[in-house]
Amino acid sequence: MCGMPQQPPVRSSATQAHRPDASMSLITNVMDHSLDDGYAEAAARRKSQGEGGLPKTLRAKLGLAAGLVLAALVVTVGAAQTQAAAPVVAKERQELIDRVDSETAAADKLEGTVDKLRDDVSARQRAALKSSGGSAQVDLVGVLSGATAVHGPGVKLVVNDAKEASTGGDGTNPRETSGFSDTGRVRDRDMQRVINGLWQSGAEAVSINGQRLTSLSAIRAAGDAILVDNRPLVPPYTVLAVGDGERMSTTFQNSDDGLYLHALEQNFGIRATISTEGDLRLPAAPSVIVRTATPSTEKTEKGTS
């Protein structure tokens, strides 16, 4: 009897009857007999059989020591390589920064040279045409094409985003169909309509944020930014238009494009102010390049068509 394992004491039915959790026998059994007893029994069995713990033979101890030495060697070599490569990476990064700065400075210098050459070519063209008696026509073409700076009376229109530009619509508004979630911001199509409305209202020259517009100018969007000839604009958008100020202002505000801008103010909080100015100064366009049109060399005789 002494060699047989002792069974755990059986709880009397009286004891179980007095316990409020007597009906939950499985849960009480798990709580009363923790799994730690099983783990302890398994550990004792492995110990009695000579398993587990540190290696006992010399060969096993040498293998464990060799593994630890190898792991330490790998970690040490990796740290040394990282420390040795750090100055090289920093040097390469600085060289890249210096190269970018150098190329940027060279590009700025070339752009300045191009501007000087363009001004020189324009001056020579005006001088040649003036000597041939076509000065007035050249000046008119230069004004209309945006190739020369102009000044005169006109209107000043300032368009800005709503004060709370993050306020969106209800999901069914057509302004959200273009992919923009922020309906309180001025879009490229809004500026297109404004500029076209000013042209139709009698503007002779137009600029946005100091950038002169020509017949080749394009107003597009890149993300949430508005681009004019691939140059980003920052709100507020100041539009200057040279022409008959009073007449142009009245005509624009009563046109479809002016009413469209007014609807943006009423429905989306976009801000816009327009005023007449006595003297506006607009710069010349940075680059006026004719890509396809060429002057005709044919001479039309009198009396022929």
Image (cartoon, grey):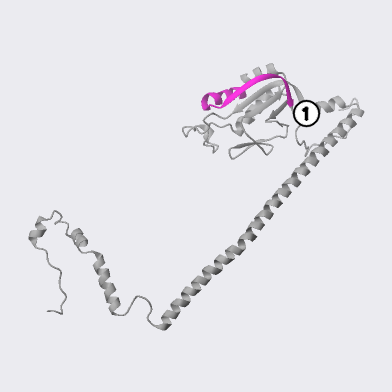
Q: Quadrant of the N terminus?
A: bottom left
Magenta-colored span: 257-281
Q: Position of residue 118 (x, y in %)?
A: 81, 37
- Callout 1 secondary element: loop
Q: Is residue 255 visible?
A: no
Circle 1 residue: 149
Judging depth in this view, the residue of 178 and 96 nearest the camera is 96
Q: Quadrant of the C terminus?
A: top right
Q: Position of residue 212 (x, y in %)?
A: 72, 31
Q: Position of residue 130 (x, y in %)?
A: 89, 28
Residue 89 sits in quarter: bottom right
Q: Is residue 224 magenta?
A: no
What residue appears at the point 27 percent right and 76 percent down from the top-left corner?
Answer: 45
Q: Is residue 96 visible?
A: yes
* Image side of residue 249 versus residue 285, left or right: left
- Residue furthest out toward the right: 131
Judging depth in this view, the residue of 276 and 298 nearest the camera is 276
Judging depth in this view, the residue of 180 and 33 nearest the camera is 33
